[in-house]
Amino acid sequence: MAIPGSAEKGSLRNAIRWGLLLAAIGTVGFRLPRLIGEFRNWREALRGGDGSGAEGWHTVLTVDLVGALVVLVIGVGAFYVLRPRAKATR
């Protein structure tokens, strides 16, 4: 039988906090191989002298990188927003 209390509430909050952080890291980790491939394609297009191709790859790389960073920032932000509140000392 579960006893409602602050320990259970803190435990749920902590589970959500860590879950969101791990989900954000997992999402960025899942996107990382694609980002590396796009970076390589962009560098290859630059070396080959293909200006429009390099610009296209740079745009795709920038959009995917910004998307990954936004997900990571939201995850880390939620991690710190949901941290346990400091108890007032009196």
Image: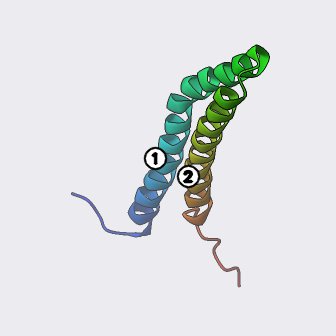
Local crowd at mark 2 within 10 Å, few (<14), some, or many (≥20)?
Answer: many
Which one is nearer the viewer's eye here, 58 or 25?
58
Look at 78% across and 16% down and name the residue there: 47
Q: In the displayed structure, would residue 3 be above or below residue 28?
A: below
Circles 1 and 2, Cβ within 8 Å, touching? The answer is: no
Identify the image quadrant of residue 38: top right
**Toward which corner of the image does residue 82 lie, by quadrant?**
bottom right
Q: Farthest residue in the bottom direction?
A: 90
Q: How far across and down, in percent of the image, does residue 39 sit?
A: 67, 25
Q: Which residue is mark 2?
A: 75
Instruction: Give the camera-side residue of 64 and 72.
Output: 64
- Give the answer, above or below, for where 52 lies relative to 33: below
Residue 15: percent from left, percent from top:
44, 51
Mark 1: amino acid: Gly
SS at mark 2 in the image: helix
Residue in the picture at 63% in, 47% down? 66
Q: Mark 2 is on which residue type?
A: Gly
Q: Which residue is mark 1?
A: 19
Distance of label 1 from label 2 (alpha carbons): 9 Å
Image-based side of 44 in relation to 65, left or right = right
Q: Nearer the viewer, mark 1 or mark 2?
A: 2
The quadrant in which the N terminus is found is bottom left
Query: Image quadrant of residue 86?
Result: bottom right
Residue displayed at 71% across by 85% down? 90
Identify the residue at image location x=70%, y=79%.
89
